[in-house]
Image (spheres, rainbow, N blue to C red):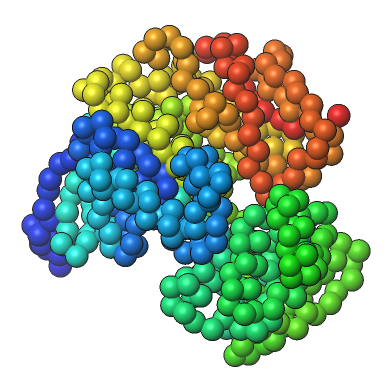
Amino acid sequence: MSAESALGEGTEARRRTRSVEVLVVGAGPAGLAAAADLARAGIEVEVLERESEPGGIPRHSHHAGYGLRDLHRWLRPMTGPAYARCWTTRAVDAGARVRTSTSVTGWASGSQDPGEAGTPSLDVVSPDGLERVRAAAVLLATGARERPRSARLVAGSRPAGVYTTGQLQQAVHLHRQSVGRRAVVVGAEHVSYCALLTLAQAGVEVVALVTPHPRTQTFPAFAAAATVRWAVPVLCNTEVVALHGRPRLTSVEVRHDDGRSARIAADTVVFTADWIPDHELARRAGLPMAAGSRAPIVDTGLRTPRPGVFAAGNLVHPVHTADVVALAGQHAARSVRAWTLSGRDRSGWPAAAAAGGVRVEPGGAVLWVAPGLVPPSAAEADGARTPPPRGRFTIWLDRLVERPVLTVRQGGRVLLYRSRRRALLPGRAIDLPADWLDAVLDGGPPITMGVEPA
């Protein structure tokens, strides 16, 4: 026996095997909201979270604005940490088991294709040791992350003082670290203004927000408030091309669309947005991925094509606000509950019916769309198609479109044609109503969602 074989057998001998009804991977808003609903329905639920505390990204976001649509806190929005604690309490009080500092290392041998292997099984490592956990259903709610500087191919030296928004918030609010005196924020989306607020709370002067787009992508009220409160200039049609300084950042080199270049003196730079889903576990399961978003493809019930495996939240559509993500978790919980209580009858798995399911694809200025699959009506329990979360599809554009027209087509048939007065911006999740679902032809050509100028 080789040393590698002996090591593998020794590891398996130490691995404890057990079963649960539903396993949720990720204790952010989507995972916790789903776990709370499932546990409340009397289903055994276990939530696995690799961080030391549950709650996801909101627990580091010390600003108000959370809990609007899911918790109806319109008059008294919550801070991120309070919101994270609220959903954690709801899940635990409902009966869900939330385990932190627990990482999923992969699908158990032979279950990379959960649909063929039967019951999905995940290999887990935690302070309790090695485990193999079998579940009737697995909900992937692993979220999304911002691309760091290295993934954006920004040239120059490799100085200290370079962050993503998540790294910045942890440094300021969790570790109480000093993050510099003068900062440049790369991006002008919602999260970019969150980074601006965090820097202001840390006493850092923000000297510019830099975006390659012709205008900001956040709500006008956010941009106006930032301008009034901090008078931060927004450099549109501008890209960060290099970082300079050693050992600490000293300047950020930018290039305008007319070819002019300049250096902005700064000892801190924060790269915001440019999201990518944390899809490693989904990819290891062999789940099909959407080309534009690199997220696992799900149907309108948030079911993947693998029986017993679901996906929800910003893993599916990077990236939406926390309240929308929590509502998506509750939407997924309804599908998980139906699957679990049905005794895992594979004939009731709409996304697995490749001949009847219809793909939803982006067109025109649309970079990606979610959900990416409309299940066949015949496979649904009552013959009526499950609507997507909140009755809406989510699209993301790759460019600004003035006087946009939103279209949904299946082959030569127009299912939706709707114009809007306001421009649609890149870098923002855009909702598209799903009131055309009943007009989809089972077994027909793919559906194309597009945005075009009028």
Residue at x 63% of width, y 42% of height: 429
Looking at the image, which is closer to me, 315 or 70? 70
Q: Quadrant of the N terminus?
A: bottom left
Q: Is residue 318 left or right of residue 29?
A: right
Q: Is residue 400 visible?
A: yes
Foreground of the two, 411 or 149: 149
**The C terminus, quarter of image:** top right
Say left or right for 146 vs 212. Answer: left
Residue 82 drawn above or below residue 268: above
- Residue 134 falls in which quadrant of the image? top left
Residue plotted at (66% across, 61% down): 193
Q: Is residue 84 left or right of residue 371?
A: left
Relative to residue 38, is residue 96 depicted above or below?
Answer: below
Across and down, in percent, residue 359 comes to 55, 25
Q: Could you tell me residue 141's position as x and y percent?
A: 40, 45
User: Do we see residue 283 in this rendering?
Assistant: no
Left or right relative to 55: residue 47: left
Residue 161 in the image: state x and y as whole percent. 59, 81
Q: What residue appears at the point 32 percent right and 56 percent down from the top-left corner?
A: 49
The residue depicted at 46 percent of the width and 20 percent of the height is: 386
Q: Position of residue 77 (x, y in %)?
A: 53, 51
